[in-house]
Image (cartoon, grey):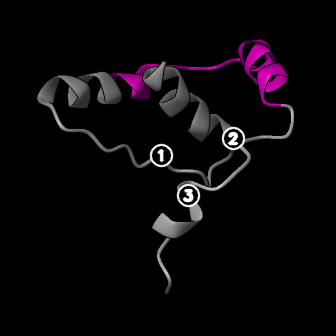
Amino acid sequence: MAQVALGWLPAQGRDIVPIPGTRSAQRVAENAAAAHLIFTPEGLDPIGSLLPNGAVGDRCPAPMMPAW
């Protein structure tokens, strides 16, 4: 699922860049494999139907957000 998410993000526009985090070498390899995913418009449609308004919500709960 993470590979799909990492592959889907760049398909949203050239100004979108995923920045994955990981704690293991195995996950690094899995995340890197997402760069080889190519989504066609038809392939993006099912994902778009699941997220009709795009990603929504904060990244973290409010108390964990930085207070810059």
Image vertical order of residue 61 relative to residue 10, above or below: below
Residue 62: % across, % down? 58, 65
Q: Tell me what residue is drawn at x 56 percent, y 54 percent.
A: 59
Label 2 or label 3, whichever comes before in sequence order? 2
Span highlighted in magenta in the image:
33-51
Name the N-terminal-most of marks 2 and 1: 2
Is 25 inside the magenta-drawn segment? no
Residue 14 on image: x %, y %: 62, 50
Residue 12 - label: 2
Discs 2, 1 touching: Cβ within 8 Å? no
What's the mark number on residue 61?
A: 3
Which tag is nearer the camera, tag 2 or tag 3? 3
Q: Which residue is drawn at 47% across and 46% down?
A: 18
For label 1, the residue is 18
Label 3, secondary structure: give it: loop
Q: Cβ–Cβ below 8 Å for labels 2 and 3?
A: no
Crowd rating for badge 1 (residues with CA inside 10 Å; few <14, some 14–19, many 20+)? few
Q: Return the residue nearer the eye: 42 or 29.
A: 29
Which of marks 3 and 1 precedes in the sequence? Answer: 1
Q: Work out whether residue 11 or residue 22 is closer to the camera in this orientation and state it.
A: 22
Report, in whole angstroms, how far the alpha carbon at label 2 lies from the one at label 1. 11 Å
- Callout 3, which amino acid? Pro
